[in-house]
Image: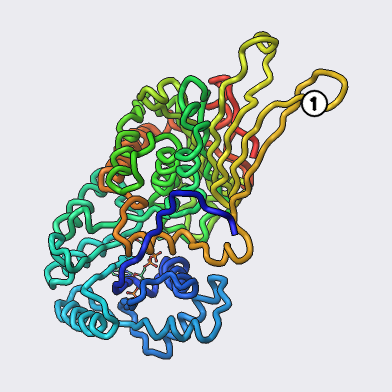
Amino acid sequence: MTETLGFCQEMRPESCGFILFGATGDLAARKIIPALFGLCEKKLTPRNFYAVLVSRTPLDRGALESRLWDTVLKAGFTPAPEVFSSFLERLEYIQADYESDAFYRRLADRLTALDAKSGVKKKRLFYLATPPAAFEPITSKLKTSGLLSDPTDCTCWSRVIIEKPYGSSLESAASLDAGLKLAAPEAQVYRIDHFTGKETVQNVMALRSANAVFDGTWNNRFVDHVQITVFEELGLEGRAAFFERMGLARDMMSHILQLAAITAMDLPSTFRDTDFKTEKRRFFESIRPLTREEVRRQTVRGQYAGYRSEPGVAPGSAEETFLAFKFLVDNDRWRGVPFYVRAGKKTGSKKTRIDVVYKKPDHGIFTHIDIGYPNVFSFGIQPEERVSFSLISKHPGPKLCFTPRSMGLDYRPEGHEAAGYPTDYERLLIEAMSGDQTLFLSSYEIGFMWQFLAPLLEAWSAAPATEPLHAYADGTPGPAAADELIKKDGRSWIQL
Ligand SMILES: NC(=O)c1ccc[n+]([C@@H]2O[C@H](COP(=O)([O-])OP(=O)(O)OC[C@H]3O[C@@H](n4cnc5c(N)ncnc54)[C@H](OP(=O)(O)O)[C@@H]3O)[C@@H](O)[C@H]2O)c1
């Protein structure tokens, strides 16, 4: 077991009921139900806890249990019979009619009975895993039926989790947000971006906080530029309908901005959610918006060659599956340091990483010799969970020659320790049950994301002729134009 030092903050989920709407859907099956089971298996659920699965599909107890068993197996668990039984004991299913007041009354009665049986004091976490169009109507009915508690009442709580996409444009996101706010104040809304729940993402903040080497050099005196890469090996995975409406920029921008923030925001004075969000907001406020002209010069859209032959994709589809862009941050720490981003589908391998590239040496014997960028801090987010630092050392031997080397820290715990390690969704559920919003996105962050995207989307739709969609071969790291984007600044993408 790895030793821990000094500070050790533990999130303690409060006893509560968990109510999952859209329980028969894809997200529920792939992420939420496995996370619930994982928490039970790892004994990370609160002591007093129950879950109610809600959907419109009729399901009797037998059908529910066999469906849950298949879901858990498909997620990669090999459940011990007693663990699976205890999971089932804490869980029930209610068929929904989201428009009917009678349904919400029935749900309220059931939750009251389950609270009494399980020793829960009206503390409820609602997860809306339905299509986004249902978020506002369901939240509003929860409110009018008395299922959302008064936020000033400290004897009970209600929290509502929602998932991206938070709208499809600045206007639709604002309208969704306004609708939600009528029913639930900001403190009750937990917006998920599952990247923030990843152990490796949190490790970036931990490393930055605890190691003076980062704080001292994490600025424009030492750093030349930053690269963020979010590559997927796969294509659409059956989500053509979603992707044809959204495209990659809308789908990925939230992840990209969250990665940029944890890399570059000033460190909060505490890890309390309010302090964290304040610093994150200050970082976003200092990102320079792209003008129409900059969109033309500083962004590259691409589409993989086989995209238009995917089932469900229109033959002439102009949705991008790749995006590269450069942005600048106007604050004292980062002024003049470009941030280069590339994200895409079918780009060869699954790889999410952040590379902080330090300046080249420009003194002594290196005044006239270009040895490239010797020092790069690389944070592997997924699938590789590794931090590495590249540097130049002396080549062993009789001559004085230099050679590139790298130091690495593998981050994934092993064996017994790994078994208790929560996944991203498990962690996010724990945090929501603890009432900590640090890892969830604020209404401001969603608004900022759409404001940042708006000039890109406008330019691409208004002038398709001058904003070309560059083709790239399936399995390659994007179009040649993406290489040009960084090359014209005298830099190149990090080799993956
Ligand atoms: N799937 C993913 O990987 C993924 C990733 C990121 C974000 N999300 C977001 O997570 C949410 C759920 O995604 P999903 O892929 O699971 O969606 P989904 O499969 O399309 O829908 C989930 C469930 O919602 C119910 N439903 C369908 N239409 C509804 C409506 N008009 N009103 C109320 N309920 C309705 C259906 O269950 P019943 O018919 O049984 O009620 C369905 O099984 C969405 O907001 C999505 O954008 C999903």
Quadrant of the rendered image containing residue 358:
top right
Q: Which residue is mark 1?
A: 395
User: Percent from the top left, x then y, of residue 275?
Assistant: 29, 42
Quadrant of the rendered image containing residue 132:
bottom left
Quadrant for ligand 1?
bottom left
Q: Amino acid at mark 1?
A: His
Establish if 321 lies above or below 403: below
User: Percent from the top left, x then y, of residue 187?
Assistant: 22, 55
Left of 146 or right of it: where is 97?
Answer: right
Q: Nearer the viewer, residue 381 or 398?
A: 398
Q: Residue at x 57, y 71 (%)?
A: 76
Left of 121 or right of it: where is 354?
Answer: right
Residue 207 in sight here = yes
Furthest-front residue in view?
A: 6
Q: Nearer the viewer, residue 297 or 353?
A: 353
Q: Residue at x 34, y 52 (%)?
A: 440
Left of 418 or right of it: where is 460?
Answer: left
